[in-house]
Image (tube, rainbow, N blue to C red):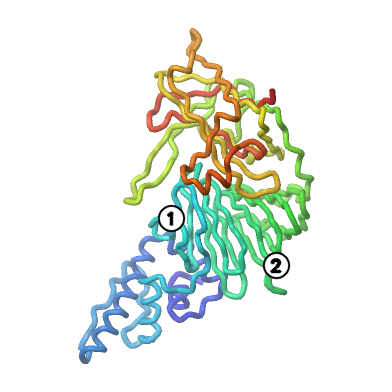
Amino acid sequence: MNDDLLTQGYLDGTLTSEEMAVFQQHLREDGELREHLRAIAEQAVAFGDLARSEPVAAVERPKKSGRTSWLTLAASLAVLAASAVLFLSNRQPAVLTLVENTGTVTWSDGSPIAPQDRLPAGTIATVGETSSAQFRFGDGTLITLHGETELTFSEDGRKILALSRGTLSAEVKPQPAGRPMLVRTPSAEAEVVGTAFDLTARPEDTVLKVNEGLVKLKRLADGSEINVPANRSAVASLDAGSALDAASTPEPLTNWSFDFTTTTPPRDWRGFAKDGAMHASPYVAKKQDDGRVTTHYGVSVRTALLEEPLRLLATGSSVIRYRLRQEEPGSLQFMLLTHRTGGGFGGNFECKIGADELQPDADGWCEIAIPIARFEPIDSRTQLRQRHPTAAGNVITSAIVSSYREDRKLAVARFELIEK
């Protein structure tokens, strides 16, 4: 169905939930389509206002902007007026409520979302690697987004989610018979009746980890399906020739290292590999209410996105170690992004180290050892600090070191998690 038919179906109220999800995605991606729909809606409102005051002689049509102008003034004016009110004032039925967030969360049009905002079907995104947001459906189902994640959602008889990129954790209440929740990614579709799971959408595949219950995973490349039970994981890639099976979720490790001098890191990690080190690259740390972004320069070790399943467990005696250097001296921010061992968001934590603590050798390299106790919750709100007080006991999904807003040519040669 093309954009004109989708738009007409939207205004007529005849789109299926699947078509609504597609239409919302098109609205997010296509500024011209948004302006086209806004102009139609404004025309309908203007017509309604005029009709209430005096007979209408003429109403200016919206500009075509290269699109088919299939709407005429005489076509479904009552429906247009109702749709205009929904579009302009967001009075569509609420589907999700933002429970809490860290960092920036934005709506389809890029505007920020605040806790307790009730949202109609649309697209939401968490901005920045350390951002997270928890949403609640009316039946109590919880969805948590982590890092740079984008999700389109609707609920019309059943919940349908489209995860275009990033990671979500879900705690799904039992769904109505015959109407399981669907979560779609570019490479897979997950069918959920009631369970707890983590799902990551990458450009080339989808990674599923089931914590409770059962999830049916379909690979879109060939339509093959597999049931993934609790404590099992599966990867559905774009390669129909690859194996699709449910592997046991590995036991967490308390000691692990990655040496950039001998091993090429996955392309999903932040930074760029060169000359035996991972060099910092810019990333969005947060987004201001006025749309401006704060950019930091850093390197991330995203253990959750390794090809071989891996879980790193932080304990009370854990130590995070780095070998790194900067071309210019300055303070550094070390961050840990975590999940609970049973799945779901575990909190984000940071340790700030001043330039005076860094003792470079003759070649400029520093050995940094940070006890887990030095990492504190990033979010300053009391209720969130009480809910996620420490990284100890959590699984580390990503470790980030940054030089804040300054590009001091930070490079990392080795990362380690050790237990003393």
Q: Which amino acid does label 1 sit on?
A: Thr
Q: Marks 2 and 1, Cα distance to the nearest angstrom?
A: 28 Å
At horizontal 64% and vertical 64% (from top left) the residue drawn is 182
Q: Is residue 83 above or below residue 188?
A: below
Where residue 238 appears, x then y in whole percent? 65, 51
Label 2 sits on a secondary structure element that is loop
Label 1 sits on a secondary structure element that is strand
At horizontal 54% and vertical 41% (from top left) the residue drawn is 348
Q: Which of 98 and 8 is in front in this view?
A: 98
Furthest residue toward bottom: 55
Q: Quadrant of the C terminus?
A: top right
Residue 106: image tag: 1
Where residue 111 appears, x then y in whole percent? 38, 57
Q: Which of 375 and 306 is in front in this view?
A: 375
Q: In this view, does 392 lie above or below 85?
A: above
- Pointer 2 with pointer 1, Cβ within 8 A: no
Residue 87 left/right relative to 193:
left
Q: Which amino acid does label 2 sit on?
A: Pro
Residue 174: image tag: 2
Where residue 277 appears, x then y in whole percent? 54, 23
Q: Residues within 10 Å of mark 2 (few under 14, many from 20)?
A: some
